[in-house]
Amino acid sequence: MRDVRRAIHANPELSHEETATAALVRRELVAAGLREIEAVAGTGLLVTIRGRRSGRALALRADLDALPLVEASSVPFASRRPGVMHACGHDAHTAILLGVAIALHGQRERLRGSVTCVFQPAEESEPLGARQIAEAGHLKGIDAILALHVDPGLPVGQIGVRSGPFMAGADSLQITIRGRGGHGGLPHLGVDAIAVAAAVIQELQQIASRRIDPLEPVVLTIGRIEGGTAPNILADHVLLEGTVRALDERVRLRVRAMIRDVVGGVARAHGAAGTVEVLPGEPVLRNDEALTDLIRGAVRDVLGPAALHEMPRPELIAEDFAFYLERVPGAMFRLGVGSPAKGIVHPLHHPGFALDEKALPIGAGVLLGAVWRFLEAGTVELPHSRPRRREGGR
Ligand code: NI
């Protein structure tokens, strides 16, 4: 796992370009004797390990892609591709799942049921790999799905778990304000789209602070603004781009409607026109109670109770694993990879991000423990009803 992780780390590939990474995974699987491999979503792979006895079907997921970032680290296996870096630990996720697949293949005679390992492309950018795989129907017949994500904020040896809402639903916003151009010294003869955009940005912040229950987390960030051509010319249009996140799907839909109201209403009040395009991203990631318990049990079995860290709060970062959870119950847990004594302290997506490789066998051990617990009948009660497909479209 360490060698594979380093090889992938040195040769990172952006979303939907993970051809060398997928080829490496496939090579290792084939060399270990695994044959049931299927290409999915372009560069992704599904590999299924079937036990001798029939039983339930579990899926495990890893992601293959890296980020557009210049690596600032001195490890000998640092990125050889300038401007591309595995700064979210997906190299480790892939290496761990590969190790798990090969281990399960070696134990298949004793396995009851099947395990499908999903090596998905494009967790980091649209079109999101998990959405493509889920929508293409590859989860048909799967009873549950599990995944891990590295966490440099947790010391190596610790596993973070949380049931219920865990990560945010996130949408991208594109807002256009159309005014009327003119001379900067004669504002009354035009409609200054920049002044209107400023009012829109201010009013949008009232949604989270005044209109949504303060106990419901919502964040709305305008991260990009573009408009105007010269200091003395009224801008006739402005483009605003942002992200809006929530931990409840109903709140997410209400906020979308409020954004349209605010943008349209404020623009109209100033004699301008405002339009909103919502680009739906990841759904809210909600960990299934019973499957989170399954992971807790696996952590206690494999590492002991002291390794279990109950995560006190959800986070407003998003994760496309949530697309699988719209169709199949599942859970994601955090794998501690932090090591302050070794200087491994940087957060995900940071150019100095690193991870303690001692976490590789720990992550694989917890996944294997969870597989055995799940496939041994009777140890986990699945929820009776599957999560309903959200209505109203994204
Ligand atoms: Ni990630």
Image (cartoon, rainbow, N blue to C red):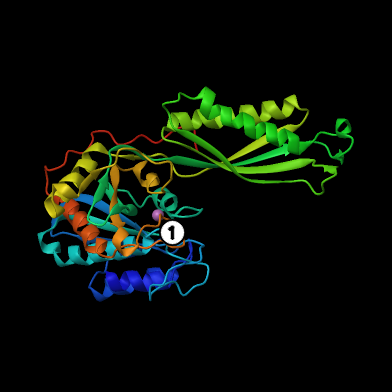
From this viewpoint, which residue is outermost toward the front? 341
Near-viewer residue (103 or 267): 267
Q: Is residue 91 left or right of residue 365?
A: right
Number of labels in the image equals 1
Q: Position of residue 89 (x, y in %)?
A: 37, 60
Q: Which residue is denoted by mark 1 in the rendering?
A: 41
Tell me: 233 left or right of 160: right
Residue name at image x 52 percent, y 71 percent? 82
Quarter of the rendered image showing ligand 1:
bottom left
Is residue 195 positioned above or below 268 on the image?
Answer: below
Indicate the position of residue 197 as horizontal and vertical percent values.
70, 36
Q: Is residue 238 shown left or right of residue 206?
A: right
Q: Secondary structure at mark 1?
A: loop
Q: Nearer the viewer, residue 54 or 239?
A: 239
Instruction: Name which quarter of the figure residue 172 lies in.
Output: top right
Establish if 373 lies above or below 265: below
Within 8 Å of ligand 1, the CB of disc 1?
Answer: no
Rendering quarter of residue 335: bottom left
Residue 92 visible in the displayed image = yes
Residue at 82 percent of width and 48 percent of height: 230
The answer to whether residue 114 of the structure is visible from this angle is: no
Nearer the observer, 334 or 282: 334
Q: Residues within 10 Å of mark 1 (few under 14, many from 20)?
A: many
Location of residue 162 in the rendering, given as x and y in whole percent from the top left corner: 28, 40
- Residue at the image point whose x is 57% and y is 31% from the top: 205
Against 189, residue 48 (above or below) is below
Q: Is 66 located above or below residue 178 in the figure?
A: below
Q: Say which amino acid is labelled 1.
A: Ala
Quadrant for the N terminus in the image: bottom left
